Amino acid sequence: MKPSLLQITDLKKSFTGPDGIRQLIVDVPEFSLPGQTQVAFAGESGSGKTTFLNLIAGILKPDDGKVLLDGADMAALAESKRDRLRAEKIGYIFQTFNLLQGYTCLENVLLGMTFGAGVDKDFAEQLLKRVGMGDRLHHRPRQLSTGQQQRVAVARALANKPKLVLADEPTGNLDHKNARDSLKLIRETCRENEAALLLVSHDREVLAQFESVQQLDRINRAAQTEAIV
Amino acid sequence: MNIWRIIFKSLRQHALSTCVTAFSIALAGGLLMSVWVVKQQSQATFTGVNAGFDAVLGARGSKLQLVLNAIFHLEASPGNLAWSDYLDIKKNPSVELAVPLAVGDNYHGYRLVGTLPELFDKAEYSPGKKFELQPGGAMFDPTRREGVVGDFVARKMNLKVGDTFHPFHGLIFNEKNQHAETYVVTGILKPSNTPADRVIWIPLEGIQKMSGHDPRAATDVSAVLVKLKAGSAIAGFQMDMMYNKQGNRLTFAWPIGSVMAELFDKIGWFDRVLALVSYLVAIVATASILAGIYNSMNERRREIAILRALGARRFTIFSAILLEAAMISAIGMAVGFVVYGVIVTVVAGVMRAQTGVVIEPWKFNAVMLWAPAVLIALGALAGIVPALKAYRTDVAENLTPHS
């Protein structure tokens, strides 16, 4: 049994809705993820999956609970330390890729390194070559297809040699072929870089490729309540 | 990739707004430095130029007019004084040197000044410096129709040694008023960067006895330049009392620098208006930095959220925006030095042509340090508001919608 990389306990997060009523979005009593493993969460729209990932990444601060990442409690850290921890240990792949339009492919990856392990141009180029973008180092995102943009986003997520890669609907904007190829690439590169992968998706084809798939509403009690309502 | 690279990228992404804002800073900075330098250098030069003399004796009238006429070769003479007045002051034991001047004619607008050769032999226009002739030239013979031409006039009128010219009557050029006399250029003065460069010097008698001049005034002079003996400051007070308070026929303009300082006091409001205009331009330019960056914050929110998600701290984002604003100012100030150079070079050219006074655009002045520093600081200050907005950007909200 591999030791836990991520250990979540009694994690809660609520937001105030437009009607002024406080609404619980995430309520996860317990969840753990061993290092170098790959888990997919099946979550429908509104199941709190992005909020859950943002809590793990330290982008959001929970109302309550613990998020132990490689021994450090993300939830208890000051914001600047959460930023640092995120930069060093987490790679994040977004559904909308979130590449910076004014930067080239290489610069987008280098930017990922700026706030983390430090800029290593050779490694950035190596990553881009690995994801098949070696001949597009100096292209800007708008000059790329969506599939190519996703590849750059994958390279950027791995730029700081993270221990955990979070992927939020990473294939949501891709066609079937690109989605399949992209998912394969994400899983392979995470393995090669010894990073654990936590992916959320509502796409059955994507989920079918994982050995371990969990229903988000099983671990997120707030989503269960939502479902009952 | 570092914070400077991120700032550079942002400046390039917003190139149009960066250029417009930087240019307004350039105008403000250039104008501010120009006003400051022109004011300080012209004031220092005008109050410092005395042609090596302490006072000017002339007909009863304005001291300022007397100094402008005798030292700067501007303005009309307030009137004549008798040769005996010149002899009287020359004999005064406190006077080291007294040189008479006579004006009243021009050559294509450049003033002819009649004087004695001792102005060139004995007077030092600044400590240790006497007027010198360019190689191949000679001083005019006071008994002949000869002239020595100032460097500026020689270049403008293309006059060389051996050339001849006819003077024109009056101080303003009118081709109908040509005198019959023909003068020969015997020498060209080396540049002195003083008003003397704009003058054609001829013998005193040349002006006094020029055809068409009043024969009754044939021995009169327009002014007498007076140099007091060293340590005779009290003599200046005594002569001031004698000519200005007790007498009512002559004016003794002493000390020359104070007379010019009074002029600058009188026109000081003009400097203040110019300075006020440049301050206002600086404020408007600073406000345009604020508006430019602030208005772009909406489109930058997503970018900021991405940077934050990649691990950039709030303070890093805050600093980047602040530095970006300061950089716009810095770029503006770099261009501002070009604007300054153009303005001051033009002003210096006009001033040299009109007065003979030389302004050095690139001579160091403290404003060249503090104006850029202040404008860059103001730029950074203007960046605080958008930087705070960037600092407060909600990452999760701007990164992806809640699901």
Image (cartoon, coloured by chain):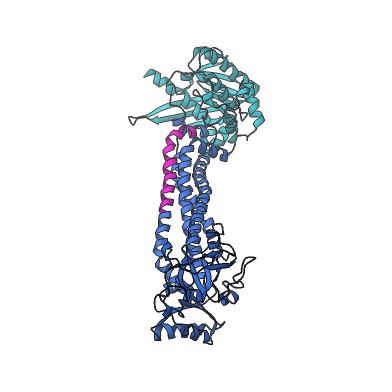
- Across and down, in percent, residue A100 comes to 52, 30
In the rendered view, tell whether residue B380 sits above or below residue A196. below
Q: Residue furthest front?
A: B180
The foreground one among B59 and B346 is B59
Question: Would residue B12 appear left or right of B173 to someone viewing this image?
Answer: right
- In the picture, which chain is cyan? A
Q: Is residue A40 shown in magenta?
A: no
Q: Which of the 4 image quadrants contains residue B246?
A: bottom left
In the rendered view, tell whether residue B54 sits above or below residue B155. below
The foreground one among B109 and A221 is B109
- Across and down, in percent, residue B78 comes to 40, 74
**Stretch in magenta:** B279-305
Image quarter of the N terminus of chain A: top right
User: Which secondary structure dominates the residues rendered in magenta?
Assistant: helix
The residue located at (61%, 30%) in the rendering is: A160
- Across and down, in percent, residue B191 comes to 58, 64
User: Looking at the image, can residue A93 be seen?
Assistant: no
The foreground one among A47 and B199 is B199
The tint of chain B in the picture is: blue
In the rendered view, tell whether residue B188 sits above or below residue B34. below
- Across and down, in percent, residue B39 comes to 47, 62
